[in-house]
């Protein structure tokens, strides 16, 4: 009976000797009777549609009941389907044909399909499924893109034909649909040949339903009206719903919108008589918060250019709101969705002409970055662990570049999801992925948003966010730890760019942590190394745009901020364990004139009894700024290093990647050529030459000339090592070994203890290459992310993007793809070489970083300026790099550029005494700013605060060990420890050292008291031991010039040691414990202790 209700000839008939089988024979309460009545009512409702199909069969020879292959002949999967059928093009009928079954093996062709009875779009598409069908159900699905005329049913057609008519409009992905209604008296001969009938054409385009009469030679005697219209798949709530008859608005009806079902019901229509044309119009207004920028490269784009891109345009005066924004019409459809114990897979297929009729009115522009979309994509969701999953979107038609950074991913995914912290569901119409935290139901990721694009050189995806509390994305300068959600865009592309507001700087970290409203936290990494930008908007939502590679996301579910960082570093690799001495205070300067100047500085520091462990030497020690050489002014550097090291001091030397090629006897370059290590032009053996610091031989540099002239007259051609090549690592290690031991001139060997690698974005003083670049599209791509060099191209201050590099497996890649990995690729071989030649743990500090750089190095926050705002923002930078898994971080104390001012430098020394990497460093041409360059008062202030640091080094070293083994943070925002107190979510002028010490520095001039927040705990002054309870409150603290406020949290035990002039001596002093009891009289703590310098004894356990 269920199936027969949809036979064109629907008749129940049997022989005389058999039992009665009409529905009534089975009893008034039988399932058969009830189901029969239900589906016969649906049949009668759809009779106008069926009658129209017969008209088309009669006049055009079309089929009425048709196989799926008739409509989807290009899909081979339909060719053998014979247990389902269609009524015309639009109604899919799936019966149960086997005894005892309550499901049917069904194929869902490539279209949007709506459940006839609920109006909901189903998520299946282009796939076989087991369709659940209880005994009283048959599968009925309406195809998107079609309009079905219906009529209120009755017991007979004679009765039903007098009832009101209606329409079911099943929208396709473009919000369009079409259909027909044929109507005559239903019984007479010759109505078609004599054209004595009504024929309507129905269509929906551009938010307009049109009922147009093709033939109107029949007047129905029953005065039938269209009274109800149901529109399925309406993805936005319409406004200004108007019915037009003869060009005039008539009083309507009711427009009811069901947002969850995406159904619009227009009911109680009056005056729409059968045989007359009418139309219905509505508007789809896009709320400002739901506007996603379709033209990010031009905020003032014209309406014409916006619509050429296929987007919507609306003028606005609201700050930041885009005037050109995406329609919600999807560009891709998800099909073949497979839910498995290990994850989810699906195909994403580009929809033909995925542009609304409204936007399509303007001609398309071929060079548009949104053009050239890839037709077939694959999306996979992998459940790696109970708290970590991966979402990967990639092309199935051609292999695209993927980031060659190894991650610590389990060898096989989970085979179950019951204990996972997350639930993943696929949304369709439009396509989107939704990730939900199981425990709270919070949706942490929802990509069912407009603008998803996957082109050859432009990829974009947006997601809703669970709150406005987003932290991360680097390396850029910004004024608060929490990201500003007011329509701000941040670029990421490694660049030699000093910290300035919103400018993309040295490293790239496409990673953020989000706090959810219920205080849970999660983190998201996009593993993509191409130039990109991200936009944060107050929806709250996030849009990623990158110009290459694939979309490869990793999510960790915490649920606490500290657990998020631990899980993230488990994924990317735990931070390197620094040697104990690297936690001591360090001095550096670009502009030392000789080794004697360093020796005098050391003597002055010793005389002032200011603790100090490490002396850095910048490129001044090099001959003409060539790596692995020694300047005549530093001929005694080897002697000085050895002398200072006998007193427990350590040395860190700088190395730059660029190697001079304008030399005749420069073995570093010669060996590099022999080992084929330098970056070259594609399909060529020619080196890509640039210019950086190295100077030509036999020239006298006139420093008074402008930089451009100096560059032209004095700078040598330099080659850039390709650190992705396997051979480069061996060559680089050999050169570092030569620097350390210098077998030809042992008296010039430099027994360094650590290395600082600079200029490794890589920085180039000419744009691209000497002589220019050769590929316009790679250096000036169709979409240029929101970078500092947006107006001049990607090659600004670096290499040409078409430069070729070689991965360890021998595959060739463009610098365009791997540019931001340059510093990352240099860090590991530098770290390994440093350990091999010194035989000790050592330290590497790198300027350019990428996720997992912390496994081999620390980071300084770059060439900052001697300014109060940079002092303040250094806290943000440190906390951010804690988030990124690089805890050994600090800023140049007192600033790199500009002359430091006395009060600011004092306050910076006080703050910098609690940087994990604590170094005073500045540039040539500025005044000295080391602690002994001011006066005795300054020396006293510096000495006192550094003595506190040195006393706390056992605690700091223990934190570093926990970071190395567990991925814990060292410097951490207050929100990490007090997540339940949302006041802490915005605090970035104070910070925690581990879980136990609260640091509240002075960050403004002429300030001698501060407001500091004390979360709920018992707090003790570190220096006096006096304690007070706090219920979570702000307090005013005195802050004289000689004082930084330090407080210990009750419940913790701090190991400490009597400080010495450096760690060599302090490690020999007696130790103690400070026990800060909580209100229950309890406290706990840890101490990690080893020899402070050996390699490999305390590697983190393997996963």
Image (cartoon, helix red, strand yellow):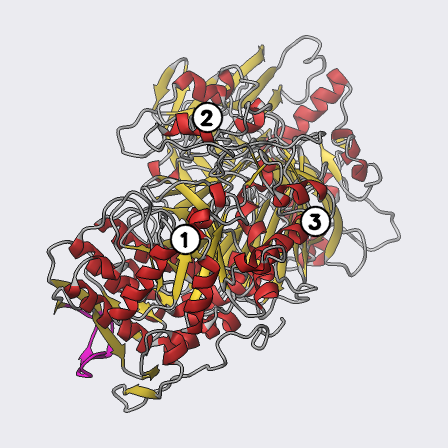
- The spot of residue 915 in percent (x, y) is 34, 64
Residue 560, image quadrant: bottom left
Which sits in the foreground, 451 or 213?
A: 451
- Badge 3: few (under 14), some or many (20 or more) residues near its Cα, within 10 Å? some
- Is residue 948 in the magenta section? no
At 87% from the left and 47% from the top, the residue drawn is 15
Q: Secondary structure at mark 1?
A: strand
Q: Which residues are magenta?
A: 1014-1035
Measure how far apart labels 1 and 2 are at the Cα level: 40 Å
The mark closer to the camera, 1 or 2, is: 2
Residue 43 is at least partly visible in this image? no
Tell me which label, 1 or 2, sits earlier in the chain.
1
- The spot of residue 321 in percent (x, y) is 33, 34
Answer above or below: position of 1072 versus 491.
below
- Identify the disc placed on residue 727: 3
Residue 593 is at least partly visible in this image? yes
Answer above or below: position of 806 versus 609.
above
Number of numbered discs visible in the structure rendering:
3
Which sits in the foreground, 109 or 93?
A: 109
């Amino acid at each position: 009976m269920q199936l027969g209700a949809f036979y064109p000839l629907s008749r129940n008939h049997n022989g005389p000797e058999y039992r009665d089988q009409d529905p009534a024979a089975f009893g008034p309460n039988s399932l058969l009777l009830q189901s029969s009545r239900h589906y016969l009512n649906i049949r009668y409702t759809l009779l106008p549609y069926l009658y129209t199909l017969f008209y088309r069969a009669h006049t055009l020879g079309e089929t009425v009941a048709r196989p799926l292959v008739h409509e989807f002949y290009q899909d081979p999967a339909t060719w053998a389907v014979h247990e389902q059928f269609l009524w015309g093009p639009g109604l899919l009928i799936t019966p149960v044909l086997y005894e005892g079954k309550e499901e049917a093996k069904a194929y869902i062709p490539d279209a949007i399909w709506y459940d006839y009875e609920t109006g909901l779009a189903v998520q299946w598409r282009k796939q076989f499924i087991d369709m659940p069908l209880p005994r009283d159900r048959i599968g009925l699905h309406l195809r998107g893109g079609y309009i079905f005329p219906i009529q209120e049913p009755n017991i007979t057609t004679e009765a039903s034909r007098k009832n009101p008519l209606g329409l079911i409009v099943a929208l396709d992905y473009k919000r369009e649909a079409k259909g027909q209604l044929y109507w005559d008296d239903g019984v007479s001969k010759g109505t078609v040949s004599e054209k004595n009938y009504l024929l309507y054409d129905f269509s929906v385009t551009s938010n307009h339903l049109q009922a147009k009469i093709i033939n109107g030679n029949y007047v129905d005697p029953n005065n039938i009206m269209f009274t109800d219209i149901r529109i399925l798949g309406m993805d936005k709530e319409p406004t200004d719903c108007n019915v037009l008859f003869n060009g005039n608005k008539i009083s309507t009806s009711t427009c009811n919108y069901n947002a969850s079902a995406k159904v619009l019901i227009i009911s109680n229509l009056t005056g729409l008589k059968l045989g007359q044309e009418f139309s219905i119009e509505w508007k789809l207004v896009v709320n400002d918060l739901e506007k996603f920028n379709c033209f990010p490269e031009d905020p003032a784009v014209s309406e014409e250019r916006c619509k050429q891109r296929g987007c919507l345009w609306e003028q606005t005066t609201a700050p930041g709101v885009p005037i050109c924004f995406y329609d919600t019409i999807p560009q891709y459809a998800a099909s073949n969705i497979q839910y498995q114990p290990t994850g989810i897979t699906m195909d994403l297929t580009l929809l033909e002409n995925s542009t609304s009729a409204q936007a399509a009115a303007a001609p398309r522009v071929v060079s548009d970055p949104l053009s050239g979309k890839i037709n077939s994509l694959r999306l996979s969701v992998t459940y790696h662990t109970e708290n970590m999953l991966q979402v990967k979107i990639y092309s199935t038609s051609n292999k695209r570049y993927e980031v060659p950074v190894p991650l610590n991913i389990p060898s096989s995914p989970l085979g179950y999801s019951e204990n996972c912290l997350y639930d993943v569901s696929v949304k369709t119409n439009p396509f989107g992925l939704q990730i939900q935290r199981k425990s709270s139901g919070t949706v942490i990721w929802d990509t069912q948003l407009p603008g998803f694009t996957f082109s050859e050189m432009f990829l974009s995806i947006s997601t809703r966010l669970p709150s406005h509390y987003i932290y991360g994305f680097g390396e850029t300068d910004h004024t608060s730890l929490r990201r500003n959600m007011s329509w701000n865009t941040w670029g990421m592309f490694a660049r030699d760019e000093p910290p300035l507001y919103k400018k993309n700087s040295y490293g790239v970290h496409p990673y953020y942590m989000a706090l959810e409203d219920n205080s849970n936290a999660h983190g998201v990494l996009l593993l993509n190394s191409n130039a990109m930008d991200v936009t944060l908007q107050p929806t709250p939502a996030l849009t990623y745009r990158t110009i290459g590679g694939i979309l490869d996301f990793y999510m960790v579910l915490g649920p606490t901020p500290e657990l998020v960082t631990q899980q993230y570093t488990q994924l990317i690799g735990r931070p390197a364990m620094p040697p104990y001495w690297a936690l001591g205070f360090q001095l550096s300067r670009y502009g030392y004139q000789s080794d004697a100047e360093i020796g005098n500085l050391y003597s002055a520091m010793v005389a002032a009894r200011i603790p100090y462990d490490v002396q850095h030497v910048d490129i001044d020690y090099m001959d003409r700024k060539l790596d692995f050489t020694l300047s005549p002014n530093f001929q005694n550097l080897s002697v000085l290093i050895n002398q200072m090291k006998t007193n427990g001091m350590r040395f860190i030397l700088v190395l730059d990647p660029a190697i001079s090629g304008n030399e005749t006897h420069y073995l570093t370059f010669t060996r590099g050529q022999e080992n084929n290590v330098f970056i070259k032009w594609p399909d060529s053996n020619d080196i890509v030459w640039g210019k950086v610091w190295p100077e030509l031989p036999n020239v006298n540099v006139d420093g008074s000339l402008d930089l451009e002239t100096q560059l032209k007259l004095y700078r040598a051609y330099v080659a850039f090592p390709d650190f992705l090549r396997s051979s480069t690592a061996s060559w680089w290690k050999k050169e570092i070994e030569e620097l350390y031991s210098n077998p030809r001139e042992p008296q010039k060997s430099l027994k360094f203890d650590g290395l600082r690698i600079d200029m490794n974005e890589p920085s180039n003083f000419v744009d691209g290459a000497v002589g220019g670049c050769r590929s316009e599209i790679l250096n000036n791509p169709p979409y240029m992310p929101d970078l500092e060099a947006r107006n001049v191209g990607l090659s600004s201050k670096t290499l040409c993007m078409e430069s070729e590099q070689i991965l360890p497996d021998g595959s060739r890649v463009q610098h365009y793809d791997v540019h931001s990995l340059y510093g990352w690729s240099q860090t590991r071989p530098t770290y390994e070489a440093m350990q091999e030649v010194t035989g000790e743990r050592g330290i590497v500090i790198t300027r350019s970083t990428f996720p997992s750089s912390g496994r081999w190095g620390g980071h300084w926050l770059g060439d900052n300026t001697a300014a109060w705002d940079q002092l303040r923002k250094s806290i943000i930078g440190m906390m951010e790099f804690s988030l990124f898994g690089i805890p050994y971080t600090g800023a140049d104390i007192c600033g790199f550029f500009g002359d430091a001012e006395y009060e600011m430098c004092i306050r910076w020394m006080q703050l910098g005494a609690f940087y994990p990497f604590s170094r005073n460093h500045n540039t040539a041409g500025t005044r000295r700013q080391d602690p002994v360059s001011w006066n005795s008062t300054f020396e006293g202030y510096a000495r006192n605060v550094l003595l506190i640091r040195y006393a706390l080094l056992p605690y700091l070293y223990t934190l570093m060990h926990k970071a190395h083994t567990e991925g814990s943070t060292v410097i951490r925002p207050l929100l990490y420890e007090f997540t339940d107190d949302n006041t802490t979510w915005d605090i970035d002028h104070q910070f925690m050292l581990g879980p136990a010490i609260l640091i509240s520095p002075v960050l403004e001039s002429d300030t001698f008291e501060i407001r500091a927040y004390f979360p709920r705990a018992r707090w003790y002054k570190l220096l006096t031991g006096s304690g007070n309870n706090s219920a979570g409150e702000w307090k005013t603290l005195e802050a004289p010039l000689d004082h930084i406020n330090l407080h210990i949290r009750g419940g913790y035990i701090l190991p400490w040691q009597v400080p010495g002039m450096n760690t060599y001596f302090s490690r020999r002093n007696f130790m103690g414990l400070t026990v800060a009891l909580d209100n229950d009289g309890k406290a706990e703590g840890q101490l990690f202790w080893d020899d402070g310098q050996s390699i490999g004894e305390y590697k983190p356990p393997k996963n």
